[in-house]
Every structure is written in structure tokens, then in C-alpha cells.
Amino acid sequence: MKLTRRSFLRSTTLSLAAAPLLAGPRVFGANDRITMAGIGMGGQGRGDLGGFLGFEEVQVLAVCDVVANHRQQAKAMVDARYGNNDCASVGDHMEVLTRSDIDAVLIATPDHWHALIAAEAMRRGKDVYSEKPETLTVRQGRRLEQIVHRYGRVYSGGSQRVWGDYNWYHKMVRGGAIGEPKEAWVNVGGPSGPCYLAPEPVPEGVDWNRWLGPAPWRPFHPSLIAGGFRPYRDYSGGGMTDWGCHGFGGALFTLNLQDTGPVKIIPPDGKDVERLTFVFANGIRIYHGGGWGGLLSFRGTEGEIPDPVDGEGRTPPDIDIPNYKGRGGIFGDFLHCVRTREKPFRDIERAHRTATTCHLGNIAYWLKRPLQWDPEKEEILGDPEASRWLDRSMREPWTLA
């Protein structure tokens, strides 16, 4: 076959365009700063941003939000920290992700954007710290796990409470304080549902189409850009995935179930089943709601915690449970791993497993029937309708390829 110069150049260009953006991790010197950007600068995002700004090894170069007021407040925080006016402030996250001088991104957008921005960031050579819930669907989580490994990125889910708040439970249960664990209760909010908010005019300084992104189109309502999106299924899984990623994450880690999932999910039926129940292959049951210890309660063959009278007053056994690396909590854990390329405490697999448990609970609530789940194949067994809820269609042109 005769290969002309024009056909060679054309085929080469097409091949490069189709090829993945393989960007290896940067090698850090002793004095190199980790350059970061924040995407999604509402209240939680600015809180996370403030946490990262407290580390001397971090240099925040840009902030991004579709709401002008949010990004302006975030820029003011960064500029005040460094005593200059250098921080870029943009409304399109691609303006951040296409920059070659940014090592890592903080993602604190509404939940329906988390996976898409994280995937694009990793394809473009960025490490990712993402707020929870890390995904809107089960399938998004497994896709993110594949992207993490394909591009060799560091990914940390943002559920600091799993260790920071609940390590007393981890030490007590793993140290044998209740004998063989049998049951746990996680007292968090319920599932999300349809959104029927009345339409209002879009104010100046809000890119409403971009806020919606992959979600179905609907008219603007001010509560949605002020943190009020979580009750609505198009954007979030409600309390089940919000505080659920903290609470169920804490319970799963306590019970050493953080790398698997339930085999059966049973919703309440008003008769024999009082609470949504997750049944695991080893017989342990985790209930949604109830208990006596606030957010978490555990019962085993030899007792229960927290003590109904003394609460968490008992001193936990001195046992070693691997948790954060580096210094400074979950933010420091992420930064340490950016430098060393180790797995962070809330790596993608564990973040995905926790979120999946929460998503499955929502599906059982929405359909009002039990689900059989294969945690190895990640399939709902014998229920095609329920299986369709493992993923969602997206509004064009957005996709998670």
C-alpha cells in the first residue's frame, strides 16, 4: 500500500486524538510545593479549601465555581493567605483541568458533578481529593476506580469522619470489646426523591446550565445553589449518601467490611421489617436508623457499644489500625500520598464500596422491595428494573466515558 505524506500525517493526528492523556506523576523535590485548584466553592468547598491552605507545602493557584459569588469568596481567601492577587477565578472547570501547572484538584461541587470532574481531572494528570459522596451511581464508582489505575493517579474520598470521628468504635470492636460483632445501626437521613421546586429567574452571576451539567434540565431555584440540592434524586442520594458515606463508612470500617458489600438489602415493609437492613455474607446486619448511641451503635456476642449508661467512656484497647499517613488528618493524608504515590486512607476502592452500600439502600427504598446483590460482580440478581438504577443517563454533551 502506498502511504503518502498527507495520509501519514492524517492517520497520526487521528491516533493521537484518540489516545488517552497519559501524564505521569510529577516527581517532587524536598522544597517543591503541591499546586492545587478548588472546584466547587460553596460552603463545604471553601471549608475544605481553608483546610488545604493551612499546609505550607500547598500553593493554590485557581478556584472555580459556576456561582460568581462563591468563587469570589474563595479567591479572597486564597489571596489573603498568600498576600497577593494571583489566584485565578473561573466559572468553567475545564479552564482549571487544562492547566499544566496544577498537580491536584479539590472537588466539592454538588454530588452529580463529582465523578465527571474527577475522571476528567485524572485523565489530564491531576490527583483528586473529592468530597463525598464520590459518585451519583454505583457504575460511576467502578468507572472511577478503573480510571485511577489506568492513569496512575492518587484519589482520596473526603469522608474524614470514618477515622477522625469513629476510631473509638474501630478500636473497641476490632479489639474484641463486644465479642463477635453481629449487628450495627447507622442513624443518618433517608433517600432523595423527585424535585418539584417552583421556577424562579436565574440571577446574574449564575451559570445555571453548567450547574445542571449532566442532570436533567429543570428551572432554576435559589435553594439548589445554596446547598439545598441533597433532597433531590437528580443531584444527590439524600441523607443516605451524604452523612451515609460518613456513617456507613464508619460502620463498614469498624466491622472490617470496607472492601466488600452486602448480599441482601431489605427495605422496611411496615410489618416484619422495621428498618432498612443490609445483610452481609458473614451474617452481620447493618440497620439504617435506630440504635442507642447517636450516629453509630454496635452489638456482638459479648456486649454492645456505646454503653447505654457510660456512652463512650471506656478506654479503647491500644491496637494498631492503619489509617492516615503523613500529618494533618485526611488532607495531610492526601498530600502525603500525592508526594509518595501511596494509597490514601479513603482510596477509590473503599470510597466506592461505601457509596455503593448507600446507593443500594436508596434503590431498595425507591422500589420498595428487597435486592439480592453480588458484591464481587457488582450486579443486582434477578431484577432488571432495579439493575437499571445502577447508572443514569446524562444530559448531552456530558458523559463519563
Image (cartoon, grey):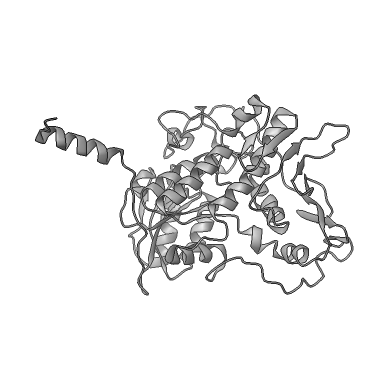
Q: Residue at x 68, y 28 (%)?
A: 382
Question: What is the x, y in percent for residue 77?
Answer: 44, 60
Residue 250 at least partly seen: yes
> What x and y, as percent, mark residue 21?
33, 47
Total labels: the figure holds 0
**Closer to the camera, 100 or 383?**
383
Q: Is 112 above or below relative to 304?
A: above
Which of the 4 image quadrants contains residue 166? bottom right
The quadrant of the rendering that contains the N terminus is: top left
Which of 136 and 141 lies nearest the eye of the viewer?
A: 141
Q: Is residue 19 above or below residue 220?
A: below
Query: Residue 399: x and y, percent?
Result: 44, 34
| Residue 195 visible at all | no
Residue at the spot 80% in from the left edge and 35% down from the top edge: 268
Q: Position of residue 360 (x, y in %)?
A: 67, 38
Q: Residue furthest front?
A: 1
Question: Measuring 43% from the left and 71% from the top, which residue is drawn there?
Answer: 56
Vertically, is 387 above or below 284?
above
Q: Quadrant of the C terminus?
A: top left
Compared across the picture, whether 78 is left or right of 391 comes to left
| Residue farthest top in this picture | 385
